[in-house]
Amino acid sequence: MGKAFGGDHSYFFDNLSKNYIEERLFLDNYFILNTKQKDFKWELFNETKEILGYKCYKAVSQEVKLINGKDKTFYTIAWYAPELKYQVGPQDFGGLDGLILELTDKKRKYYCTEILSSEKTPMFILEKPTRGKVVTEEEFLSEMDRLAEERGFPTSK
């Protein structure tokens, strides 16, 4: 199990079920979304670099989407550390033989800034997010619009 923080979101990964549980905060309201880990088709490379003292290997996944009638290829580049035997990364990225310490996708770049170990944090306990209403991604988007509209903010409508 692992937990990562990104902005106003926290992510919890349950290794047994391969589920991500994401707690999102929007306009003072908490929501919980459950998602399965995406099944990426990674191409592995022998290219390496060191991140936080760990030897990391490069993996690339590509996704082709039809945009305005043309195929467009998007690449996700991950650097994973086989020494850290966790098959997860930021958000719902994972499936490699080690923890993803850096990842660049079509929208953003994620990078690990610290690895917490039991020596540093002996009382570190991970808990599943429980604050908020359990919703699907579509329900969350609708709730965002509803809350924004209630407060006079622009919506996606």
Image (tube, rainbow, N blue to C red):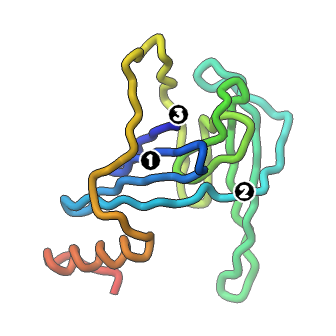
The residue indicated by pointer 2 is 40
**Residue projecting furthest to the left:** 151
In the drawing, does residue 77 fall left or right of residue 115?
right
Q: How far, Cα to Cα, is label 1 from label 2? A: 19 Å
The residue that appears at 61% across and 42% down in the rendered structure is 88
Q: Name the residue type under label 3.
A: Cys
**Residue projecting furthest to the front:** 16
In the drawing, does residue 100 fall left or right of residue 150?
right
The residue indicated by pointer 1 is 11
How crowded pointer 1 is (Cα within 10 Å; few <14, some 14-19, many 20+) is rated as: many
How crowded pointer 3 is (Cα within 10 Å; few <14, some 14-19, many 20+) is rated as: some
Q: Secondary structure at mark 1?
A: strand
Instruction: Kindly indicate whether the residue at mark 2 contacts the one at mark 3 (C-beta within 8 angstroms).
Output: no
Which of discs 3 and 2 lies nearer the camera? The answer is 2
Q: Secondary structure at mark 2?
A: loop
Q: Earlier in the sequence, mark 1 or mark 3?
A: 1
125 in relation to 157, above or below: above
Q: Name the residue type under label 2.
A: Phe
- Residue 4 placement (x, y as % from top left): 45, 40
Which of discs 1 and 3 lies nearer the camera? The answer is 1
Q: Earlier in the sequence, mark 1 or mark 2?
A: 1
Q: Name the residue type under label 1.
A: Tyr
Q: Count the marks: how many?
A: 3
The residue indicated by pointer 3 is 112
Instruction: Kindly indicate whether the residue at mark 2 contacts the one at mark 1 (C-beta within 8 angstroms).
Output: no
Question: Which quarter of the rendered picture does the C terminus lie within?
Answer: bottom left
- Residue 68 placement (x, y as % from top left): 66, 87
Residue 148 image-quadrant placement: bottom left
87 in relation to 31, above or below: above
**Residue projecting furthest to the right:** 46
Q: Earlier in the sequence, mark 3 or mark 2?
A: 2
